[in-house]
Amino acid sequence: MSFPLLTACLLAPLLAALIIIFLPKDESKLHKIVAVIGTFVSLAISLYVFFAYDKSIGGIQFVERINWIKDLGVTYYMGVDGLSLPMLLLTNLIGFTAVFASWNIPNRTKEFFILLLVLIAGVMGTFITQDLFIFLLFYEVVVIPIYIMVIIWGSSKRVTKEYAGMKLTIYLLIGSAFLLAAVIATFVKATQITGTPDMSFQALAQVNFPEQFQIWMFLLMLIGFGSLLSMFPFHSWSPDGYAGAPTAVSMIHAGVLKKIGGYGLIRFAVYVMPAGAAYWSPLIAVLGVAGCAYAAMGALAQKDLKYIVGYSSVSHMGYVLLGVAALSVVGVNGAVANMFAHGVMAALFFSMIGFIYERTHTRNVSDLGGLARQMPKLAVGFMMAAMASLGLPGLVSFIPEFTIFVGSFERFGLLAVVAIAGIIITALYVLRAGANTLFGTPREKYNHLKDLKGVEMVPLVVLGAVLVIGGLMPSLLFDMVDSGVAPIMSHINEYLPTAVQIGGKY
Amino acid sequence: MLTTISPMHFVVLSAALFAIGLFGAITKKNAITVLICIELMLSAVNINLVAFNMFVTPEAFIGQIFAIFVITVAAAEIGVGLAIMLTIYRNKLSVDLDDFDWMKW
Amino acid sequence: MVEFAMNHTWLVPLLPALSFLIIIFFTRPWPRLSSTVSIAFMLSSFAVATLAAYGVFTDAQFKHEPLVYAIRWFGMEGLNIDVGVLLGPSSAMMIFMVTLVASLIQIYSTGYMKGDPGYSVFFSYLSLFAASMLGLIISSNLLQLFVFWELVGLCSYLLIGFYTHKNSAREAAKKAFITTRIGDFGMLLGMLAIQIIFGTLNLYELGQIMPNFEDYTTAGMMTLIAVLLFIGPIGKSGQFPLHVWLPDAMEGPTPVSALIHAATMVVAGVYLVGRTMFLFVEVESAMYLIAVVGAFTAFFAATIAVTQREIKRILAYSTVSQLGYMMLALGVGSLTASFFHLWTHAFFKALMFLGAGSVLHALHHKADVWDMGGLIKKMPITGWTFVIGGLAIAGIPPFAGFWSKDEILLATFNEGHYLLFTLGAVTAFLTAFYIWRMIFLTFFGEEKPDNHPHESPLSMTIPLIVLAVMATVGGLIGTPMNPHWQEWIFFGESHHIVPNIPIMLVSIALAAAGIGLAYVLYIKDRNKANVKDLAIRFKPVYTLLYNKYYMDEMYLWFNHKVVDGSARMTHLFDIYVVDGIVNGLGAVTKGTGGILRYTQNGKIQSYALVFFLAVLVITILLAFNDTTSMALVLGGVSK
């Protein structure tokens, strides 16, 4: 076996966290530097893996597999394919920039960065493992640091940070309870059918589960992953949680943690239970569209910047669900790519809002205005995120959205039109937020504020570059995603009522 | 009339012993009595273990081994239980279980 | 050289894009350097475009077969998108026109924007806009076109809101973006349907497929697609009812109004319909819709323009009206006439906007035409070039606008749309009237004492002169005597329209009548008593027109009451119902726990009793249920 790159990638932040534990408490500069190094190593490795992955061969690569619990068929199985690689890269991009976005954390930097690094490692773990058990393990690891970070470093606005943290945690745990039931049932059933216990996704996908069983299991998974993905009506943790959480947690949560839901839905639910997916896909589509439209309208009524982005992320996850529901290569490709795109843009959005909040101590749109004059660089970052959010072509999110629309429009027709109409509402609330925050008459009380400088530029530069590169060269992302999604979707057609084909349908 | 001792005899004896122990453990107010009653219940179990060993697997001594385990554990338990009672008595000057409800809601 | 330019036409958009990057990342602190970079790149782009256009117009094979080359952009099973260049006569004409006008306007801006703190940024935006617009023109793929379509929208947004500290600019920019977004929504739907039904978005391939669309879909679906696709141009090209953003867009600096909101971006919608003509001609009803929307918009906007007071607003409504003409021409199936008008309109409208900018520059942004007067004495170059523009738009031969407008009216008449023809003819009269009303009020008549105008610097007057020349001779390439235009730019088959002398005469007469009426009302009548009298006598009509038929108010009402109202409802629903259920579940759990905790009475013996009873109950239940393992165990013992 060659050098265990993925394990190294996973351990780098954990190692950094370990080092920070032994650093003195008041050396906050040192904590940050160690955190930067830890996340940078992960980012570098994941970039290397992303470009070294051989798309022409496809499948799981960079495999590391060690037996762990033999009787349960659990193996320490690390490996990546075209589905997990974009997510891995996304995690590390956001992890790396989140460290810079929390550069000005006022108190307890030591604890903060330890938890942040554990959180990053936990999220990363879910994406690079190919073993269901390990996936679940990392998923649970993630919950703990989130709760602590919201409670200690969060902010109380419309709801208290304690409420927000509690809501976030309980939702995640309820989701995982449904999931756990589904996982155990699936495992037991698979062992009954095949006789050999094996927890890897690939092995489970080979099992021919009875159709009725698949339908029930898929529903459980849909609730589990759906509440993680803030699927309507299980979305209400999302705006409150993001508003209460500190910037870095909002970035990671909206950027990647949420995507575990979508990733799991494709990797586990759709892959292992195709008949269930086919059965429930109309429901997913309806919930996705409802989420799109409903959350967009909700965002329109918000006054707090973080709430606006919180609702908008619910709305964007509606698109992801819609793409998954299409159950075609085109739709699911779009869904995965949109998760990547939304991750980058939400992280940029939250980091910019974090900087605004640090400086002005308000996130209320009506208290802001004219900031573009005082902080032009921040305004650029904000507008880039805003434009990506409304799906401007040339930025990373347009092509994924377009792809989702193609996939869902051909399967669901009118239903998809409602979601597509969401682009108008999105433009409305995003531009309104941008205009009221950045443009108009500058306020004198903000004249002394300083623009982004030094390390604060890192989130803008890194995430902004990804936004533009991904927008101009969508094939970088799509070829990768396609190589991962195509095998997963190769058998789904057998379960769909009518085969979905491009062309000649009408 | 001479009859062999059937399993039923053992079961009735141990059930009676267990019932007496249980009754005592639930109704008696004195903590020491309750501890003694718990010992009775354990003895009932022991009788069952040994007796069924004779009828089910006469060639092995699984039941006897279990019984010895139970006796050991019971002794340890009584030791710990009496120690706790002693401490409580020193503080509260009472061994009445009705007085010991400070762990309620 | 020509060969190179044609095979590297992508350089035309790429050069301004590079200049955008250079200015943003390197030369921003040095304004003069930034504008020099921008103009240099724009001029080299103009050179490439000219060479490419020369190559196209000297080789007759391009009349029917465009030059197409493309590379893969991204793809997957069932969705493959390529980006590339489609160079035919109309795109060659467009890149020539856009690079020329853009270059002139950038030169003009060096004078107009002098001393502005955002000077460098302004030029970077102009470069980005030029890049996007040129990319739109040469797109070989509908999705690629859409990408640039949105990017020009972005540039328009940024440039309308260029004076970020002004609230009005901010609102106008937002309005422009969102209104055009509504159009883009329709267009996106149309594109999706095309992709799904025909499996490609490549314009050239679609052009080959469309005549046999019955193999793919039904006529009803085609109508739907055509109508959806047409919503995009309605938004972008300011057609009724989505025209409301265009007059407000005048909040941007005047060069922007000239470049984006008169000469180039707003004609993108016309260009798109022209590019996808192969689709529209298959659907008669869609064509008729286009013609009706176009003619109505032309008339509607002209009536509003008659009463407006601000110089740029009048020009903005005139732009809407002229765009309506172009749409009308497309609707009656004459790509030739439509693009001809697009071509001449770009020059005379850019000219008039830049002239207006020159006036505003001289009068320190005093915009009301009633506050001006006699400016032609102090600003001769601006004044006389403006007059040329006025003659061109009014349709006086031999100026450019006459030939193209006549072509449109003729095409409408020949197609038998007499009602639309009448509407067009009335609009021609109104156009001549309101434009000359503005000219007389601004440049002639008495000078106002508190104005101290001065002629603008050379950097501003030279573009005016060049554009005036183009506005004069630009139409001569398509006259009935010299029908080069008609030979090159057409859809389907080039047909020579026989000149119709009566219609030509009617058209001239209407223009002359309009100018004459304006002269009588605004110059001969020194006190303007008749005008004031008319305004009072027809007060309801006047108020209605002056307030633009209250369209803005209706949209505002809809936006604030309906959209925001339902948003608030959603918000309340979310907080009280969805969150209420969530919090309710939490409260129920908490409450149940609060009740159940009383079972914990702290008495160990009661716990033991409950425990024993529970074991007893379970054992009995299991014992009576003889399928369970417990029953087996019990049964095994009792045997």
Image (spheres, coloured by chain):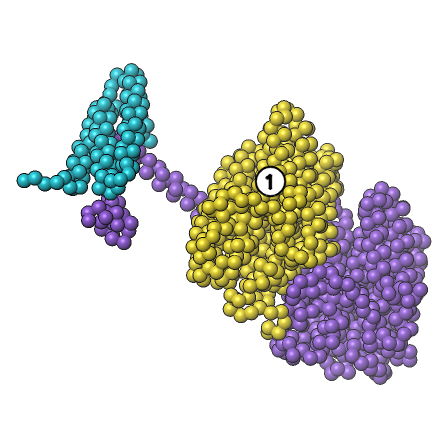
Q: What residue type is labelled 1?
A: Ala
Residue C285: % across, % down: 66, 77
**Foreground residue among C500 and C229:** C229
**Foreground residue among C60 and C119:** C60
Q: Chain C is drawn in which colour?
A: purple
User: Which chain is disc 1 placed on?
Assistant: A
**Foreground residue among A222 and C122:** A222
Residue B29: % across, % down: 21, 26
Q: Name the residue under label 1.
A: A121
- Sort mark 1 into few (<14), some (14-19) or many (20+) by Cα contacts within 10 Å: many
Residue C289: % across, % down: 68, 74
Q: Is residue A320 above or below residue A16?
A: below
Residue C448: % across, % down: 86, 53
Quarter placement of the N terminus of chain A:
top right
Q: Residue at x 88, y 68 (%)?
A: C53
Q: Which chain is displayed in cyan in the rendered image?
A: B
Which residue occupies the extreme left position in the image?
B1
Q: In this view, does C559 lie above or below B28?
A: below
Q: Which residue is drawn at 49% across and 48% down?
A: A73
Quarter placement of the C terminus of chain A:
bottom right
**SS label for mark 1:** helix
Numbered disc total: 1
Q: Colour of chain A?
A: yellow
Q: Which residue is drawn at 43% across and 52% down?
A: A188
Q: Residue at x 84, y 82 (%)?
A: C496
Q: Can residue B1 be seen in this view?
A: yes
Q: Is residue A405 visible?
A: no
**Foreground residue among B75 and A489:** B75
